[in-house]
Amino acid sequence: MKKHLQLLIIFMTGMLYTAISHAESVYFVQSANAKIWLNSSFASKVIAEVGKGQRLISTGQQGRWIKVNFDGKEGYIPSLLLSTHPPLKRPMIVKAEDAEIRQGVRRRTSSFTSAAAARGLTKEDRERGDIEEGVDFNALHKMEALTFTDNEITQFMEGGKL
């Protein structure tokens, strides 16, 4: 009985701490566009779409979804698309004719870096995601590095085993 009471106290303290630590936080959208979902599921209805830099007030969290208020509506956004700081103000596209590009500088980025940049993720965001969100960007990099021949793709689409 005493052990159950202790576990209940620990559980209630944890719930209280979570509620207090997340009380009305300010977040900023980091991706070019982010959908606000009615519930914390991609299967739910999209109630709004916001752009990069949009300031949102959070009133809670459900798993890896942040509960936000926008235009009088309450919905959820995946936490990976949000940050507590505004997105960086840097140019999104570097053109080959830009004066700052010097001879011999690598002009192409890896597909991994391009995909992360398109989502508004900096190196620091990827590191934070690895720690806070449990995202494995190294595994993503390995997956993006995989290549397949046309024959392998055709065989896969036809249901054959590789």
Image (tube, rainbow, N blue to C red):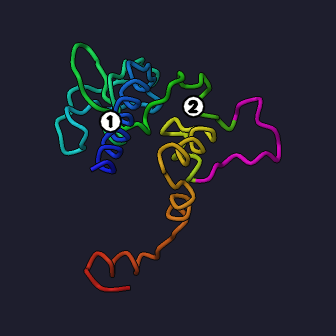
Q: What is the tally of numbered marks visible in this picture?
A: 2
Q: Amino acid at mark 1?
A: Met
Labelled disc at residue 92: 2
In reply to whether residue 96 is colored magenta, the answer given is no
Q: Amino acid at mark 2?
A: Met
Outermost residue to the right: 103
Would you place residue 23 above or below residue 139 in this image? above
Would you place residue 114 above or below residue 17 in this image? below
Q: Between 50 and 64, which is closer to the camera in this rendering?
A: 64
Q: Between 7 and 127, which is closer to the camera in this rendering?
A: 7
Name the residue located 36 percent from the left edge and 22 percent from the top edge.
Answer: 58
User: Which element type, helix, strand or loop, lies under badge 1?
Assistant: helix
In x, y percent, where is residue 80?
A: 44, 39
Q: Which residues are magenta?
A: 97-110
Name the residue located 54 percent from the left edge and 54 percent from the top edge.
Answer: 137
Residue picked out by circle 1: 12
Outermost residue to the bottom: 161
In x, y percent, where is residue 131?
A: 55, 46
